[in-house]
Image (cartoon, grey):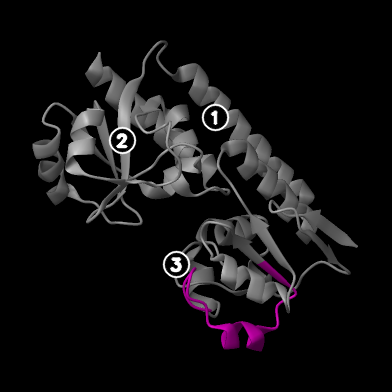
Amino acid sequence: MYSSIDQMGFTINLEQAPQRIISLVPSQTELLADLGLSTRIAGITRYCIYPPEVYMSVPRVGGTKSLNIESIDSINPDLIIANKEENTKEIIEQLREKYKVWVSDISNMEEACDMIFNIGQLTGTENKASKIIEDINKRFEKLEKEKHKNSSLRALYFIWRKPYMAVAGNTFIHDMMSRCGFDNALYYETRYPELSIEKIKKLNPEIILLSSEPYPFSQKHIQEFKEICPHARIILVDGEYFSWYGSRMRLASDYFSALHNEVFNVAE
């Protein structure tokens, strides 16, 4: 028996290790591959681009919020991996009527590591999952020691344009910002609020982080934000390192270390 309680409180029981897994979350698709389960991934979304060999060979079942149920039915999965934020409540409830659905709900690194362990437990890859978690913890402990003491800058992390949307508290990105040495100017709000230009000016961030996803901010947007906050430093950042809560965290710590040193060496 393979059993696990998902992060929404649902108990998933499997008679045997799952052989046909559908992943509805890009970062968790990558995790499944890093757990050695590539040959058991039977369906992914069109956003599950890593690893490339899985993206090129595994059937796609739609987008994270617009799934093709017929495609899922044709696969007849024995396990579906989903996420409370990435996938809609309606989709998850519909899938639960037919299939075993393990749903993650992640707002910090500890919950991400809990997700990794539980998916390892449910798929019979506990040892690999434990090694990934150990590696993540060691790397982030090293990052914490490397950070400049008493260094912090008030920051806004933007994920969307028209309307402007930024990251607030109680989110995984917020936790990653903190570990990188940034004080989230929206820590007191939740999720991803829309911001007017007047609100952005009032928050008066010292650093503005423009993410590569889900909105693809690029060099051409820097001047736009400079006009709103002329004294802020505008930085383009790789959104995958800030938002992918799976095995990608092993690489995120080095990215954060380089970003931290770049920002705070200039600031000092």
Q: Which residue is mark 2?
A: 156
Alpha carbon separation for disc pair 2 and 3: 25 Å
- The quarter holding residue 268 reads top left
Tell me where residue 128 appears, x and y as whole percent. Answer: 72, 49
Q: Residue at x 66, y 40 (%)?
A: 133
Do the residues bearing badges 2 and 1 touch, measured as CB atoms within 8 Å? no
Q: Nearer the viewer, mark 2 or mark 3?
A: 2
**Residue on which disc 3 sits:** 47
CB contact under 8 Å: marks 2 and 3? no
Q: Residues within 10 Å of mark 2 (few under 14, many from 20)?
A: many
Q: Residue at x 13, y 26 (%)?
A: 231
- Image location of residue 172, percent across then percent down: 50, 42
Identify the disc placed on residue 91.
Answer: none
Q: Which residues are magenta?
A: 61-80
In the rendered image, the quadrant that contains the N terminus is: bottom right
Residue type, label 2: Leu
Provide the residue designation for mark 1: 140
- x and y percent of residue 115 in the render? 67, 49
Alpha carbon distance from label 2 to label 1: 22 Å
Q: Is residue 12 visible?
A: yes
- Amino acid type indicated by mark 3: Tyr
Q: Is residue 259 magenta?
A: no
Q: Nearer the viewer, mark 2 or mark 1?
A: 2
- For the residue pair 171 and 22, the one nearer the viewer reads as 171
Provide the secondary structure element on which disc 3 rests.
loop
Q: Quadrant of residue 14?
A: bottom right
